[in-house]
Amino acid sequence: MGKFFVALDFLVNLGGPFLVYQLAAGYMSETAALMLSSAPPILWSIGQLIWSRKLDALSLLVIAGIALSLVATLLGGSPRLLLIRESFITGIFGLVFLGSLLFPKPLLFYLAKTTVAKQGMKEEVFESNWSIPGFRSTFYLMTVVWGAGLLCEATLKIVLAFTMQTGLFLVVSPIISYSIYFGLLGWSIWYGNQRRKLGERLAAAAQTSVR
C-alpha cells in the first residue's frame, strides 16, 4: 500500500498540473488555466492530512504550505508570477529553516522528533540527546543545508519560469523539486548515520579507557 501511495504522489504532483493546464488552456486564459493547474497537488496534500489524522510539526509545515499556495493562487497576477508562486513559498521555508538557527532548537530537530516518534521512539528519549554536543551540531548543520537547498531550488525555478515555455516548466518544475528533496533527504540520512556511528565509536573508546 505504501508503494502505491508513493507512486500516486508522483503521478499527482508531476502529471497533475501539466494535464490540467493542457486541458484547460484551450477554454480559458493562461492565467486561469495556471490557477486551475495548482488544484491537484493542493487537494492531494489536504487529502493526505485528512488521512493521517495527526497534527504534528511536519503536518503544520504542510498546512502552512497549502495556505500560502492558496493565497498566492487567489491573488492571481500574470502567468509568470503564478509559475513562481511555489518558488516564493519554498524560498520562505528556506529562510524559516535558517532563521530557526537563532532559536534554542532549530526547526529540523522538531521535524526529526516527529519522524522518530512515528517509528516508535519516545519523544522524551530523543529530546534527552540534545544535551550531547555532537547531537546538537548535527542538527545545526542539517538545518543550514536544508535551508540553503530550499533557497537554491527556489532560485533555480524562478530563473527557469522566466526562460521556459509554460507547459515545459510545469513538467520540469516538480522533477527539480523531487530531485532536490530526495537529495537533501538522502544526504541527511547518510550524514545522520555517519554521526551516529562516530558517537558509538567514541562511546566504545571511552568505555575501553575506563576499563
Image (cartoon, rainbow, N blue to C red):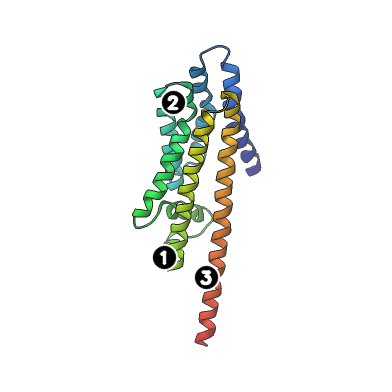
Which residue has dot 3 on it?
A: 199
Q: Amino acid at mark 1?
A: Ser
Which residue has dot 1 on it?
A: 128
Numbered tag placed on residue 73 in the rendering: 2
Identified at 59% across, 25% down, the residue is: 18
Q: Label 3's element?
A: helix
Image quadrant holding the N terminus, namely top right
- In terms of depth relative to the viewer, which is nearer, 38 or 118? 38
Task: Looking at this view, name the residue that lies furthest to the top.
Answer: 27
2 or 1: tag closer to the N-terminus: 2
Residue 93: x and y in percent read 43, 42
Classify mark 3: residues with Cα within 10 Å, few (<14), some (14-19) or many (20+).
Answer: some
Q: Amino acid at mark 3?
A: Gly
Residue 9: x and y in percent read 59, 36
- In terms of depth relative to the viewer, which is nearer, 176 or 28? 176
Classify mark 1: residues with Cα within 10 Å, few (<14), some (14-19) or many (20+).
Answer: few
Single out the mark in the foreground, 2 or 1: 2
Q: Where 24 falls versus 41 (above or below)?
A: above
Q: Label 1's element?
A: helix
Using the numbered discs, state the Cα–Cα distance from disc 3 to disc 2 in whole angstroms.
Answer: 47 Å
Tell me if I can see residue 129 in this picture. Answer: yes
Identified at 65% across, 39% down, the residue is: 4
- In terms of depth relative to the viewer, which is nearer, 125 or 20? 20
Numbered tag placed on residue 159 in the rendering: none
- Circle 2/circle 1 CB separation < 8 Å: no
Residue 31: x and y in percent read 48, 19
Identified at 55% across, 45% down, the residue is: 181
3 or 2: tag closer to the N-terminus: 2
Task: Looking at this view, name the residue that lies furthest to the left.
Answer: 103
Identified at 41% across, 64% down, the residue is: 130
Left or right: 137 in relation to 22? left
